Image (tube, rainbow, N blue to C red):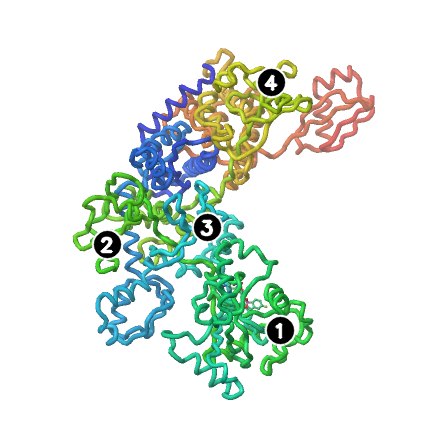
Amino acid sequence: MDYQFKDIEQKWQQFWADNGTFKAEDKSAKPKYYVLDMFPYPSGAGLHVGHPLGYIASDIFARYKRLKGFNVLHPMGYDSFGLPAEQYAIQTGQHPAITTADNIATYRRQLDQIGFSFDWSREVRTSSPDYYKWTQWIFMQLFNSWYNKDADKAESIAKLVDHFEQNGSAGINAASDEEILSFTADEWKALNNREQQSELLKYRLTYLRESTVNWCPALGTVLANDEVKDGFSERGGYPVEQKKMMQWSMRITAYAERLLQGLDTIDWPEPLKEMQRNWIGKSTGASVRFPIETSPKSSPKERTLEKNVENSLSFGEGRGEATYIEVFTTRVDTIFGVTLLVIAPEHELVPALTTSAQKADIDAYITQTKKKSELDRMADAKTVSGAFTGSYVLNPLNGEKIQVWIADYVLAGYGTGAVMAVPSGDQRDYLFAKHFNLPIISILDTQNIETEADPTKEGKYINSDFMNGLDYKEGTAAVIAKLEAIGAGKAKVNFRMRDAIFGRQRYWGEPVPVYFKDGLPHLIEEEHLPLLLPEVDKYLPTESGEPPLGRAEGWKHPEGDYELSTMPGWAGSSWYWYRYMDAQNDKEFASKEAIAYWKDVDLYIGGSEHATGHLLYSRFWNKFLKDLDLVVEEEPFKKLINQGMIQGRSNFVYRLIDEEGRGTNTFVSHGLIKEYKTSPLHVDVNIVENEVLNLSKFKEWRPEFADSEFILENGKYICGVEVEKMSKSKFNVVNPDDIITRYGADTLRMYEMFLGPLEQSKPWNTNGIEGVFKFLRKFWRLFHNDAWEFSVSGAQPSKAELKSLHKIIRKVEEDIERFSFNTSVSSFMIAVNELTDLKSNNRAILQDMVIILSSYAPHICEELWTLLGNPAGSLSYAPFPKFNSAYLIEDEFAYPISINGKTKMNLSISLSLELKDIEAAVLANADVQRYLDGKTPKKVIVVKGRIVNMVV
Ligand code: ANZ
């Protein structure tokens, strides 16, 4: 029979489903291997050909690992909470759970058609209560934990309370809010429950606090930084503004250092690691307190400097009126070059520092700043602007009086929101000082004031008695020591990363398992998990502006109101790989045994758009679960690969424009558009083949084109082509279903790999798909005779056959181990061509070929495998053929045999023969004898491995 891909593929997909062929074992003598895909959000549009790219690669790898004797876990599920289903619900009133279930059904049908070897018995859906029960449970563990910096891990809040009861706050080194109290054990016990709870909130790893958030009025929700691009929401492109709100946050900053260190232990693409490093943004420097000059009368000369600093720094420490401005600097060695202090316009001390004379200036400047986004503020390095507050601080080391300014280049959210400006050390500070005519002091003896100070190169510090002669490192250490001695500063590591907002004012997400009593949050009882998402009449905020959960009737905890915001999109995806290990467990998020066995993900494939969102949050939750001894590995994903995007290949038609500039219903073929006035129009790529427009389909495509006319070239309408993002609006979306209907899933799988290196982005281009289809048919042909009857021979394989086979064994093994899937496809084609040329139908050879090809094209291989007489379904666990290098050794050479300088023929002779034996073999050959025509050569010249020449 000819290659009937449709029947074959349906048959095997059914077989795999019925027999649970890819069910992973939870206990096995085999080594484990965990291959994970980033699970999809099931959108209404279904899968396009770009989506399966990574899934195909991971499936090839998973299947290959099974052949290599591993117990492979290769699961799939759905990240099914999220905004699109809810937006749709708002428009149509349809419950998001229904939309989501429908979309999942479509995804599942599409995925099944591609022949993936997923273990569907472990499917997860983040929106299903038996899943989000555990997301809520993890939230509760975070609420019940704090970060002990001395132990460098999370510990239970109960332990912290014990410590407070016995020792007060002394001896606690926590990652906490800034404004924590110091107290004795007695003082702690004297606090009422409310006071204690609000203090503990400053330590919890998930906590409530007022924060400035990205508020998107159109979406009615708060967005994470990575969901905002250039001041607009990534989804939908709506404007985003800054707003202060009470918000749940996750204290990810506690893990900043571990998140950074961990990157050195994992095999991820370097650019991705670099993005995480930048996001974490570690800076090593110092914090320095500049005393505010409180009374203009007391000049530093009247009091000793130390006294002065001490007085202002110790006065009212921590509470009441501020007496100093704290800056963060990475260049504390430049402290003697500080000639002004610049604070962010939003800095909390601005009102207190502004003198009445300067008030108008400062107010005007603040108004102007509000119009700029943070991004604009950082990007705009050239325009200098700022306003003087009228107040001064003192340099803590030399008592110099320093003006305090506000300027928008200083960001409120970074460091302390205040900068010690060193015009001779920093370019922005220099421009600022120049513009406002402020003093500039060199800090190095070699320095011209216009050059940036670089003490790492040359020059000696000046303007300081104790730094003279020191190098950069020593100078920095000396300044810090001085500052520490007078309590005016200390070494400090600063991170750019902020705590992560953990709440959305939306419906379709996990309810936060918290209720409020006396204004304080309390966890619900664990036995009441999951806290189910309640029904609401509409998916909109309430009249009073509360989130949609505020509409749920009778939804109330006996002791108080439930939290009304839901968890953000990243909650469910921050731990899902553990659920696959033990997806049905209703006692634990996964059993200890399952976690001890599967441990971590060996290979994770997904898009690079998750570089700082999902991949950072997942690492954070993983480290937290590790601290609680709930999981065994510090990092969740050992190796990660980002697959490239498949771009759309758009086609265009060209509408003829008439003299009045109006569009006509005539379309000009692409090669002729220079001769006419036309305007381009996207056309559905599905009615174009090899750039030729199907005219009748075009007329049917849209009613307005029904009687369109065409100006053709060579009788055809040729379309224009451009590579763009694959999107509905560009009519360039290619649905895998259509490809499968025409060519089958095996062709689709191989073709997607054939398009190019996995990591690279590349346009979808069906022009070469026929070639892949023909290859599979040719492979099928090897097993069949001319009458398309299955026919293989049991003969001993020839050397040439073995050589072809072992070349491909080695190539595919090397390629897959390097994740170079595209290069294998062309090697398969070469091997099949070689075997075809050799007229090979050798069972031993072909059976091994079937195993090698099966991870790429599983359906055709299953069919051939059973035709070869093997038990159905056993292919997936057959041993991958062993490469034997002996078959590749070139042991013969085809000598050109020439007589009187003319090559007559080639003759294969073993390379191990000596010269006289070669000569004998040549002369004994019947064909050579024929050429010699009975004559004996006068001379025979043999060059080993090159040529045999005879003179007759
Ligand atoms: C004095 C100085 C002298 C500085 C010098 C630099 C060069 P990174 O590496 O990004 O951490 N800075 C501190 N807080 C800031 C804020 N909120 N907004 C804008 N700039 C801020 O950079 C730290 C440096 O950026 C700090 O070191 C501070 O300027 C500035 F020759 O202090 B430096």
From mark 3 to mark 4, how far is it between C-alphas?
46 Å
| Nearest to the observer: residue 542 or residue 799 | 542
| Nearest to the observer: residue 624 or residue 693 | 693
Q: Name the element at disc 2.
A: strand
User: Could you tell me the amino acid type at mark 1?
Assistant: Pro
Q: Is residue 941 above or below residue 215?
A: above
| Upstream in sequence: badge 1 or badge 2 | 1
Residue denoted by label 4: 717
| Upstream in sequence: badge 3 or badge 2 | 2
Residue denoted by label 1: 439
Label disc, if present, on residue 399 of the rendered structure: none
| Upstream in sequence: badge 3 or badge 4 | 3
Neighbour tally class for label 3: few under 14, some 14-19, many 20 plus, Cα within 10 Å:
some
On the rendered image, what quadrant is the C terminus found in?
top right
Residue denoted by label 3: 612
User: Could you tell me the amino acid type at mark 4?
Assistant: Tyr
Q: Badges 2 and 4: C-beta atoms under 8 Å apart? A: no
Q: Position of residue 667 (x, y in %)?
A: 59, 19
User: Could you tell me the amino acid type at mark 2?
Assistant: Tyr
x 76%, y 17%: residue: 931
Q: Name the element at disc 1.
A: loop
Residue denoted by label 2: 515
| Upstream in sequence: badge 4 or badge 1 | 1
Any part of residue 710 in sight? yes
- Which callout, 3 or 2, points to the residue nearer the camera? 2
* Residue 890 in which image quadrant: top right
| Nearest to the observer: residue 160 or residue 920 | 160
From mark 3 to mark 2, how far is it between C-alphas?
31 Å
From mark 3 to mark 1, how far is it between C-alphas?
42 Å
